[in-house]
Image (tube, helix red, strand yellow):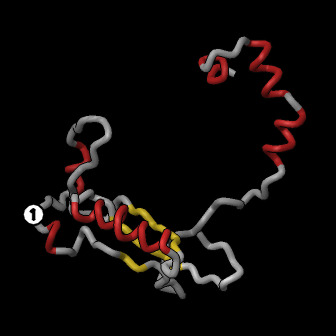
Amino acid sequence: MASLMSQGLTAPQALELVSDQVTGTAMTEREAVEGLVDASDRPEGGDVISWLNDIENDAVYARWPAAINGYMRPLYPGQLHLIRRNTWNVIMALDLATPRGIEAVASQAAAMIMRKVPVRIGIVPLFGDKDSDCE
């Protein structure tokens, strides 16, 4: 209620929105596990993710400190610590047979790696037939 009121709704409006039957039905129609993905790529049948960079082992990041206590240093908002650890990961599921999939790798992923953003980037290739919409 407080978050809705902070957006400009009055208390009666916020209560009406929260207790609305249509809103409640829309929020409960999803299955409990919808949207959850296990992206751990464990050895037991994993090896699905193709990593484009490895912050812990690539020579490009060799000058970065590896000490975990480096995460305690204060930074400006929005910055990530330059620590030689695979702490932050981005995993993109892409159909590499489409221009959209290739563009995501060529522009977005490559730009992050070239700028030395401390994020490990992985790709999970999607395979679809000509009738599927994997974009």
The percent position of residue 12, horizontal first and vertical second, equals 79, 13
Splitting the image into 4 quarters, where does residue 13 fall? Answer: top right
Q: In the displayed image of the protein, which residue is found farthest to the left?
A: 63
Closer to the camera in the image, 79 or 72: 79
| Crowd band around label 1 with a 10 angstrom C-alpha radius: few (<14), some (14–19), many (20+) | few
- The total of numbered circles placed on residues is 1
Q: In the displayed image of the protein, which residue is found farthest to the right?
A: 21
Residue at point 32% right, 60% down?
A: 119
Closer to the camera in the image, 84 or 121: 121
The percent position of residue 116, horizontal first and vertical second, equals 22, 60
Residue at point 60% right, 18% down?
A: 6
The percent position of residue 68, horizontal first and vertical second, equals 24, 56
Would residue 110 appear left or right of 134 to someone viewing this image?
A: left
Query: What residue does disc 1 label?
Result: 63
Residue at point 32% right, 40% down?
A: 78
Quadrant the N terminus occupies? top right
The residue type indicated by label 1 comes to: Arg
Quadrant the C terminus occupies? bottom right
Closer to the camera in the image, 88 or 71: 88
Q: In the displayed image of the protein, which residue is found farthest to the bottom?
A: 45
The percent position of residue 130, horizontal first and vertical second, equals 66, 84
| Label 1: which secondary element | loop
Would residue 75 appear left or right of 128 to someone viewing this image?
A: left
Please tell me whether residue 121 is drawn above or below residue 80 in the rendered image: below
Would residue 101 appear left or right of 82 to someone viewing this image?
A: right
Splitting the image into 4 quarters, where does residue 20 fall? Answer: top right
Residue at point 61% right, 20% down?
A: 7
